[in-house]
Amino acid sequence: MSPAPLQMILASASPRRKTLLGRLGLAFDVLPADVPEELEPLEEADHAVLRLARAKAAAVSRRQPDSLVVGADTMVLLDGRIMGKPADAAEAAEMLGSLSGRTHLVLTAVALECPRRGHSTAISETTAVTFHELDREDIDFYLAGSLPLDKAGAYGIQDFSGVFVSRIEGCYHNVMGFPLAHFHRHLKATGLWPDIHKINNL
């Protein structure tokens, strides 16, 4: 007898991650994790994104041990400095100004937890993004229409700020906050893909 189909849970309140995960045709619920996105002293970005993604998945998995819980975290890195989510419009403008004409890195980690299967894994992806030179008019226009207080680095490549981008090296979806192709390959490599509820199977 084949195992019962796995129900997937996305442990994130991000509408971008919900949209991207939905493109795989999988059935899933959304149950955001209540995990503070705080850095440890002297913590490197690649370590921090993995730690936070695992913490988010684990927090929800403890309540849903029979489900496959997916947690994720994204960070923007400029010259080795982590750029978090802006506190207000002024900080958002400052962040965008610092990204102007420069190349930065977007790091995303995705963790998968399923105690029922004894499964605990994590993946990460890095994309290099280069911005055009921005003038104040560009920045003010963007912030007037969409204040990006929920986005690391103060921009979302899928919205108007996509016009700021001159070049991208790596996964586009990773910049949105979820490395879709890598995640799909990981599900197949770990043998989880056939067991997850698909939309057309409901």
Image: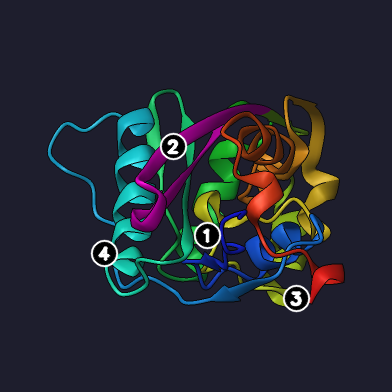
Identify residue for label 3.
145
Residue at 59% from the left image edge and 48% from the top image edge: 96
Task: Report the mark closest to the observer, 4 or 2.
Answer: 2
Q: Which kind of residue does numbered mark 2 sit on?
A: Ala
Q: Which residue is mark 2?
A: 122
SS label for mark 4? loop
The amino acid sitting under disc 1 is Ala
Q: What range of the chain is rendered magenta?
A: 106-128
Using the numbered discs, state the Cα–Cα distance from disc 3 to disc 2 in whole angstroms: 35 Å
Q: Could you say where residue 86 lies in the image, as x and y percent from the top left?
A: 45, 61
65 sits left or right of 19 in the view: left
Q: Is 119 inside the magenta-drawn segment? A: yes
Q: Can you tell which mark lies on residue 92?
A: 1
Q: What secondary structure is the stretch in magenta mostly built from? A: strand
Q: Image quarter for residue 15?
A: bottom right
In the rendered structure, are the residues bearing label 4 and label 2 in contact, judged by CB atoms less than 8 Å apart?
no
Q: For the N terminus, which image quadrant?
A: bottom right
In the shown orientation, is residue 164 left or right of residue 148? right
The answer to the question of whether label 4 and label 3 lie on touching residues, with beta carbons closer than 8 A, is no
Mark pair 4, 2: CA separation: 19 Å
Q: Residues within 10 Å of mark 2 (few under 14, many from 20)?
A: some
Q: Residue 115, position in %: x, y? A: 33, 55
* For marks 4 and 2 on the same chain, the one whose residue lies earlier in the sequence: 4
Q: What's the CA distance linking mark 1 and mark 2?
A: 30 Å
